[in-house]
């Protein structure tokens, strides 16, 4: 029936919805509107991603001092395995540093895509022997890792460290993005930084640097090697290199520092590349004093520790002694 | 053997070749185990680019463009010769993009043109199928004059490029995103399960770390377009556009294997058309087209009357209701001439523009071992294998850095990744010799041999910390991999704003030593626009793109002084 014109009353039921239908349709629309308003209210100014404060934790892996042993020892031997064993025995042997069931992280310098002979990375022979020593002492697990500068897979492969460490029974870990913990380093300069988990979540840390020239810090030995525990924007650290090295050494106290001075990179560091820049020294240093280790090691570079700013600052900060002989020094020149 | 068995064989072949192709792209990766005591160089364990060397279009166009069949490209005869006798079996049995298109096309659809009569009509031969021949002829003429454009649309390079630089990186980002999202609930068993699944697939599907490629959206548009059009017309790409399909169609001209139809037993149910892949008119009453047929054998398997029979030497005679098969390529003379002429005009047109050499992008840094640009553009098929294998994510598909002529050819972007001196992988995987394989000695050089150079670094002294901000830095010098270092330092006493004296080392570049690897640019702390940057000048491959009249030997340069 057509609608009547001229505004007259229309017959009931033709152009009007039934009450039931009205309620249904009106509530559908209202429901959707309510969801929109509710959603808007719910999400308004809501912060899903809470700022997580950096973890405060001081990884101190040092062992109690014992006056029966020297703080630092140096051993020279054509056979680098024997040199390491000898130097290690002089400071008390592996049993003093690693106990049965402990998890040990070994931190060699694996910064660069270089071969062992080029002396930019720690000797794979020494890394392998160190892993073996730890496992012999009953370590539950030995992890070998480093945050490399060049591509991690190439560095671990071409340095020979992956092969040597795995052969010796270690677990080699290449750092990936979610392996980092954002930590408060509590340094004078360095505060919140990502640190590779395996350098914090472990029982013992053995720092295994190699002795190299560096144009800014003059040398890179033990304390500078700790740059490799960090992720993030490491390339900013150079701006205040001395303080950042000291902050790192204050933060991460290794159980033992084993310095590879079997080959020493005299120029073109820290990457090297030319064998002409490498001196053969056949020496290994073991030390419980980070500063003493660095102070002795820089002599291979023809430097005096007193001239190297970060070593001087580290001593001032109470990290150890530049006068390594006063710290107790034993030397076996073979 | 029944036709059903043969069809199942085809399905098995498709799955296998698709799997092998994807596996090869996956293995185009830094996954090697060497003993550094015995070998100092890194070699890939598999010939990962071999699939691309089986591509006859790659072989033909590179042959036309540079006059030689490079290394393994002779393998392409293994596809071409059987095609001459059997027809386009490659499209239906082997081609990974064809297989992908086949699968996508066969997903059930709500479109009218994918059901019943609509499907039958859409599977009849259409004139648009000629387009691929004109594309092919255009590419051929362009290649003959020296610009290789076939790689843009050639299915094998296209597939390798799309998987390597688009699909896998996207999958990586998606997997990481989902894992992070699941973990964000903080429910331990769920996080553990997600991590378990992730760890199961990540080692062989995902890269060691997330890679980021330049301009992947342009690659996505083409690849996505090819995939999506399958939902409108069955295998639209294969039927209408694929230049390799066109080439194989042309080479099927004298095929001895083909479809014989028996008009007497046929009751015109059209089931053959329902499942036809190539739109080659398998039904009785129309002219079967050899050059369009993918030899998938679906029609024969579908025929309830047994009227269709693929066999060697089918009779060419026919009746009025069943026209004889047509082995001729359906193209017109005028359009053939026009396509060839357009292709021939492409090269002079491109080279009369300014983007080749004359006003080339200064940041057009080619991979180490690349041949000179003219030859490079006659060889590169844009398969993206070099980009996929680069362990540093340094190589990327270009957008317009080498003009429209070089879209998706490789470029090194040091800000994303630098060239590792000891690495020669890109040359190892290049299937066409656009990047020559260097030995380690040729790459890094020694006292006598010059190193391979891809550019030269320059300092932006307005952004460099020791130069502009009285701040110590020299990260570039630390990272410089040459010996002696190409970045050298001069110590200077400068005063900062407060008048305090600061001793800084200011970096300089020695153009005699710089190889343009870009490690300095990569490591520079001025991250958004590095204060040291590489441009292509000084690259070994070019006699003209040089700065120095005479380059000193490394031995004549004193080792850097220690401060």
Image (cartoon, coloured by chain):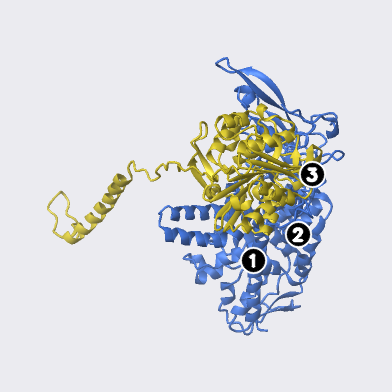
Chain colours: A yellow, B blue
Q: Residue furthest front?
A: A68
Above or below for A41 versus A27: above
Q: Residues within 10 Å of mark 2 (few under 14, many from 20)?
A: many
Res A66 → quadrant = top right
Q: Secondary structure at mark 3?
A: helix
Q: Secondary structure at mark 2?
A: helix
Residue B26 visible in the displayed image: yes
Which residue does the numbered mark 1 point to in the structure image? B19
Q: Nearer the viewer, mark 3 or mark 1?
A: 3
Which residue does the numbered mark 2 point to in the structure image? B53
Mark 1 to mark 2 CA distance (whole Å): 17 Å
- Residue B444: give x, y in percent of width and height: 79, 42
Q: Nearer the viewer, mark 2 or mark 3?
A: 3
Output the chain of dot 3. Answer: B
Mark 2 to mark 3 CA distance (whole Å): 25 Å
Q: Secondary structure at mark 1?
A: helix
Marks 1/2 same chain? yes
Q: Nearer the viewer, residue A24 or B54?
A: B54
Which residue does the numbered mark 3 point to in the structure image? B443
Q: Residue at x 57, y 33 (%)?
A: A246
- Residue A118: give x, y in percent of width and height: 76, 43
- Residue A284: give x, y in percent of width and height: 71, 44
């Amino acid at each position: 029936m057509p609608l009547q014109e001229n505004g007259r009353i229309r017959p009931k039921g033709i152009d009007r919805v039934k009450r039931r239908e009205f309620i249904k349709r009106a509530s559908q629309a209202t429901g959707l509107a309510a969801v929109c308003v509710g959603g808007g209210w719910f999400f308004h100014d809501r912060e899903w991603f809470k700022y997580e404060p950096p973890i405060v934790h001081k990884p101190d892996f040092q062992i109690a001092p014992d006056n029966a042993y020297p703080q630092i020892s140096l051993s020279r031997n054509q056979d680098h395995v024997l040199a390491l064993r000898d130097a290690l025995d002089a400071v008390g042997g592996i049993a003093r540093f690693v106990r049965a069931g402990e998890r040990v992280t070994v931190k060699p310098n694996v910064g660069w895509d270089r071969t062992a002979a080029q002396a930019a990375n720690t000797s794979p022979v020494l890394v392998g022997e160190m892993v073996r020593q730890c496992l012999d002492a009953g370590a539950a697990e030995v992890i070998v890792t480093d945050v490399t500068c060049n591509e991690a897979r190439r560095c671990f492969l071409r340095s020979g460290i992956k092969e040597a460490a795995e052969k010796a029974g270690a677990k080699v870990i290449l750092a990936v993005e979610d392996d980092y913990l954002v930590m408060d380093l509590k340094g004078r300069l360095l505060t919140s930084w990502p640190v590779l988990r395996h350098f914090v979540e472990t029982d013992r840390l053995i720092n295994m640097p190699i002795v190299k020239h560096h144009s800014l810090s003059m040398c890179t030995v033990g304390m500078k090697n700790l740059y490799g525990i960090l992720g993030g924007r490491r390339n900013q650290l150079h701006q205040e290199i001395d303080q950042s090295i000291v902050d790192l050494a204050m933060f991460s106290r290794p159980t033992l520092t084993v310095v590879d001075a079997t080959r020493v990179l005299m120029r073109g560091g820290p990457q090297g590349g030319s064998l002409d820049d490498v001196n053969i020294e056949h020496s290994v240093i073991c030390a419980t004093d980070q500063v003493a280790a660095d102070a002795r090691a820089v002599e291979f570079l023809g430097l005096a520790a007193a001239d190297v700013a970060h070593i001087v600052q580290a001593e001032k900060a109470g990290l150890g002694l530049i006068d390594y002989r006063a710290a107790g020094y034993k030397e076996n020149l073979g | 053997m029944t036709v059903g068995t043969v069809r199942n064989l085809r399905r098995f072949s498709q799955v296998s070749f698709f799997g092998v192709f994807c596996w090869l792209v996956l293995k185009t990766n830094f996954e090697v185990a060497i003993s550094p005591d015995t070998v100092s160089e890194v070699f890939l364990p598999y010939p990962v680019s071999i699939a691309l060397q089986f591509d006859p279009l790659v072989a033909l166009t590179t042959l036309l463009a540079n006059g030689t069949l490079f290394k393994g490209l002779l393998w392409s005869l293994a596809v071409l010769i059987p095609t001459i006798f059997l027809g386009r079996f490659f499209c239906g049995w082997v081609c990974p993009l064809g297989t992908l298109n086949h699968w996508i096309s066969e997903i059930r659809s709500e479109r009218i043109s994918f059901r019943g009569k609509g499907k039958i009509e859409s599977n009849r031969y259409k004139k648009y199928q000629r387009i691929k021949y004109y594309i092919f002829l255009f590419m051929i003429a362009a290649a003959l004059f020296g610009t290789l454009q076939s790689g843009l649309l050639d299915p094998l390079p296209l597939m390798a490029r799309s998987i390597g630089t688009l699909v896998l990186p996207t999958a990586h980002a998606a997997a990481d995103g989902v894992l992070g999202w699941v973990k964000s609930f903080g429910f331990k068993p769920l996080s553990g399960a997600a991590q378990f699944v992730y760890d199961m697939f990540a080692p062989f599907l995902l890269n060691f770390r997330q890679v980021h490629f330049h301009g992947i959206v342009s690659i996505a548009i083409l690849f996505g377009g090819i995939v999506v059009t399958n939902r409108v017309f069955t295998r639209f790409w294969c039927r209408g556009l694929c230049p390799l399909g066109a080439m194989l169609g042309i080479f099927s001209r004298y095929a001895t294997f083909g479809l014989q139809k028996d008009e007497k037993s046929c009751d015109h149910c059209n089931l053959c058309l329902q499942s036809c892949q190539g739109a080659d008119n398998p039904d009785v009453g129309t002219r079967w087209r050899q050059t369009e047929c993918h030899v998938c054998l679906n029609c024969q398997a579908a025929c309830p009357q047994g009227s269709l029979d693929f066999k060697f030497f089918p009779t060419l005679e026919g009746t009025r209701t069943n026209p004889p098969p047509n082995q001729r390529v359906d193209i017109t003379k005028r359009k053939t001439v026009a396509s060839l002429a357009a292709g021939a005009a492409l090269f002079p047109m491109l080279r009369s523009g300014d983007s080749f050499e004359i006003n080339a992008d200064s940041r057009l840094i080619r991979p180490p071992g690349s041949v000179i640009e003219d030859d490079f553009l006659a060889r590169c098929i844009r398969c993206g294998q070099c980009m996929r294998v680069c362990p540093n994510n340094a190589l990327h598909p270009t957008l317009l850095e080498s003009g429209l002529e070089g879209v998706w050819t490789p470029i090194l972007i040091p800000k994303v990744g630098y060239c590792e001196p000891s690495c020669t992988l890109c040359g190892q995987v290049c299937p066409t010799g656009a990047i020559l394989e260097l030995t380690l000695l040729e790459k890094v050089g020694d006292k006598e041999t010059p190193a391979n150079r891809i550019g030269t670094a320059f300092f932006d002294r307005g952004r460099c910390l020791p130069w502009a901000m009285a701040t110590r830095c020299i990260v570039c010098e630390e990272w410089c991999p040459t010996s002696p270092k190409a970045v050298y330092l001069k110590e200077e006493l400068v005063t900062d704003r407060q008048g305090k004296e600061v001793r800084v080392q200011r970096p300089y570049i020695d153009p005699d030593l710089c190889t343009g690897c870009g490690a300095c640019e990569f490591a520079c702390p001025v991250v958004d626009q590095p204060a040291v940057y590489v441009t292509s000048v000084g690259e070994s491959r070019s006699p003209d793109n040089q700065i120095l009249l005479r380059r000193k030997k490394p031995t004549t340069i004193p080792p850097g002084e220690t401060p």
